[in-house]
Amino acid sequence: MENMQSAVDTLVHSSNTLFILIGAVMVLAMHAGFAFLEVGTVRQKNQVNALSKILSDFAVSTLAYFFIGYWISYGVNFLQPAAVIASDHGYGLVKFFFLLTFAAAIPAIISGGIAERARFAPQLCATVLIVAFVYPFFEGMMWNGNFGLQAWLLKTFGAGFHDFAGSVVVHAMGGWLALAAVTLLGPRNGRYRDGKLVAYPPSSIPFLALGSWILIVGWFGFNVMSAQTLDGVSGLVAVNSLMAMVGGTVAALLVGRNDPGFLHNGPLAGLVAVCAGSDLMHPVGALATGIIAGALFVWCFTAAQVRWKIDDVLGVWPLHGVCGVWGGIACGIFGQASWGGIGGVSLISQLIGSALGVVIALAGGFVVYGVIKLCLGLRLSQEQEYYGADLSIHKIGAVSHD
């Protein structure tokens, strides 16, 4: 009997390890999506830089999160014998891998906002500070109960802040950090003339579309595998993700008037927004969440670029920042049993948690990028920006001119 129970336990542990490993690999693949979305959006003279930033940011994010960030969030220290940290078939290590891919998404998001004029080494320094300290501070507060905020929300409002897959913890955090960075950087040279926007069309719609599709597919690992164990997996999360993605696509298509850039960011807006409540909402609620997110992205992107003169190249603040906050709030609306959801969520707690995410991201962003701007400088020189980051930083272009 004991042998049978031991065999069952082994099967459970190994299955959970494989499950979350597949999720980690799917979210890792999303970083290729971030890369190609940026490659397709920036001008050709900055394509190599876009690819180089995403891979380099992931590498330094891994080091920062392994040695510092994960310990701040979850109190886990990996500087122990391998036999200790690899117990339970290494589930704890693979869980770190999975959550690392979330943490590394933060600089990947920021990369799209600061494209075409940010210096390479200072951005890597910012990545280290953000992934080691700023993001883990909020992540640990919301996903590990650090500092007692979740306990207070539960006691006061009947439910803690609910963010199943990171609408606020990951996406809003990345988007609002990017807004701080973009503000300190300023617009690209020539982007505004006589107070009017000068169009910089995408260099490659096919690459932009490829990036969007890679992100869409990987997102089902991002959301569904956030259960982290096989017994917690839910088909509801998958279908809600699908419905929000479709809702965002249709809304962006209509509101964006067939613009392919809006069209291919619309599904991402819906997916950002549904992360928080994907385990609670009815599929119709998820569809509504995605529709609102898709329209919200188009409106905020246009207003930011034209009216507010915020030169956010990929629109990461409206896409991740604004839609991420909407996702946190939408969870508190469509997650309610009265709206067809499973319940157990408080709108007030969702509002407080979402607002706190914005405050921490903005404060952290202005501190990190402000100090780096003061000490190292953030921008390429006017000449470097003119020739492009590819030749100025990497000494090679994306296309051979032999």
Image: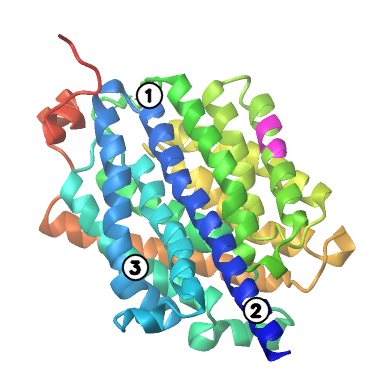
Tag of residue 7? 2
Residue 111 at x, y percent in the picture: 34, 44
Q: Which residue is mark 1?
A: 196
Q: Which mark is residue 65?
A: 3
- In the image shown, does 381 or 283 lie closer to the viewer? 283
In the picture shown, does residue 372 fall above or below 31?
below
Query: In terms of depth relative to the viewer, which is nearer, 5 or 249?
Result: 5
> Is residue 208 in the magenta section?
no
Is residue 164 something one can see in this rendering? no
Which of pointers 3 and 1 lies earlier in the amino acid sequence? 3
Q: Residue 113 appears at what percent x and percent y? A: 37, 42
Q: In the visual, does 65 lie left or right of 301?
A: left
**Figure quadrant of the N terminus:** bottom right
Which sits earlier in the primary sequence, circle 2 or circle 1?
Answer: 2
Which of the 4 image quadrants contains residue 3? bottom right
- Kind of residue indicated by mark 3: Tyr
What residue span does the magenta drawing correspond to? 246-250
Q: Main secondary structure of the magenta part?
A: helix
